[in-house]
Image (cartoon, helix red, strand yellow):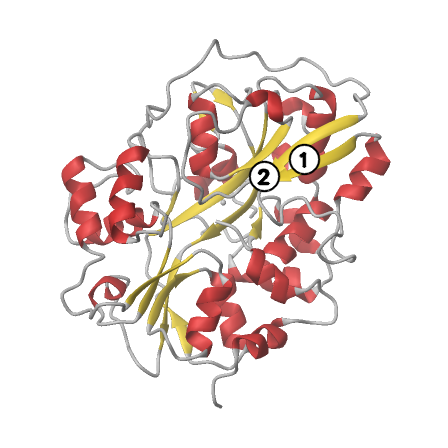
Amino acid sequence: MAALSAAGLLAAACGTDEPRVADAVSRAGASTSVSPSAAATTPSRPAVPSASPSPSGPVPSPIASVGPGERALSVLTLNGYAEWGGTDPKVKWVAGFEQETGCKVSIRYYDPYQEEKPDDFSPSSFDVISATPVVGGRLIAQRKVAPLNTTLVGGYDRIPRTLRELASVNQDDQVYGVPFLWGTSEVLYDSAKVRPAGAEAIFTDEGPVVFRDSPLSLADAALVLKERGADIADPFDLTPAQLDEAAALFSSEKAAPGRRLFWRDPIEVVQAFATGSARLAQGTPYLLDVLTRGHTKVRAVTDRPVTGWADSWMVSAQAAHPSCAYQWLEWNASPDVQRRAAMWNGLAPADPDACKGRARAIRRICADYRVGDAKAFAGVFFAVRPPDYAQWADRWSRIAPRPR
């Protein structure tokens, strides 16, 4: 069957019992019940120092109890993580929170790809934030978010230990974030054009190949170096020489100019394969699912290790409404909200109970990411902000320069 248009692929992905998957793909972000033994199969990581930004002030203490609420909450979030029906009237979970708690929510959004500035994320400007590993690591290092009393967050213990213990939300025996959605990175390829022997092919193929436009893509290159024998324990913690070697992989001698492309919106991956303008791309299991159901010949390299990430909710160190903030954490840890968020964003829910919904969409997403499989996290290196993140950003700016 001839490849469908990107719009046709997204339409093929939709079912009558799920929200708008087409929008879910376009809004997906840039982290499963597991037995205790499964956590041991996750790649081990030494403690990573939070060397990025300098700390400001003492570490605040977790609150001891939650009051009735302050009737207001300021939310700083990634797109798609706090839906109130503004994009699709069927897709909303903020209104239910307001009705149940009496906390009136005000929402602001931030761009995870924006260039970092020293005064970003003033802790007085938000109560809660949905944080990527990079943003969360920065906020922890700068002491702009508070350690959490997780006993006050109902449903926290349902989240698999592997996610709860990620370095991106833990430091010095303190927990700073409640995992919300997670994903893994895969190498996707058009099997009609190329048959890669492994993930390394995305760096050696003549192209066009499409990479995720993020400094953390350097970690995927580091995994290739690790497979070649480099002494790399953690692909997110590299020596300067290893960082240079990883960056060099993005400049294959086989690739003609213009055949290394970069995406920020996942819809670009679908469009690239649907139009035949990509041979390989960095993607997610969900994007593979969309493309497969669109009857393309796109397949995935199934080898591990791979990189992954988990986005989490954190509380400001200067939260003006701490009781409402904790009620928000618990609301977003619930299976119902995580189910809706996973379907909308095409990512895996942190709470495996979210997979018990009857909607076909959530069953597919949970199958895509193997949620509940004891080996779901085996061979996954979850992202953490590199200690020398500024150097990663500098290397990446040379690989994928953006017009000013």
Residue at the location (74% across, 26% down)?
A: 324
Instruction: Please determine whether, in this image, residue 2 is positioned above or below residue 51.
Output: below
Kind of element beneath mark 2: loop
Q: Quadrant of residue 158?
A: top right
CA–CA distance between discs 2 and 1? 7 Å
**Residue 295 marker:** none
Q: Residue flagged by tag 1: what amino acid is it?
A: Gly
Question: Badges 2 and 1: C-beta atoms under 8 Å apart?
Answer: yes
Residue 229: x and y in percent read 14, 49
Q: Residue flagged by tag 2: what amino acid is it?
A: Ile
Residue at the location (78% across, 57% down)?
A: 89
Residue underneath mark 1: 155
Residue 312: x and y in percent read 55, 37
Instruction: Please determine whether, in this image, residue 294 is positioned above or below residue 396.
Output: below
Q: Residue furthest front?
A: 404
Q: Residue furthest top?
A: 58
Can residue 154 be seen by looking at this rendering?
A: no
Instruction: Please determine whether, in this image, residue 32 is positioned above or below residue 190.
Output: above
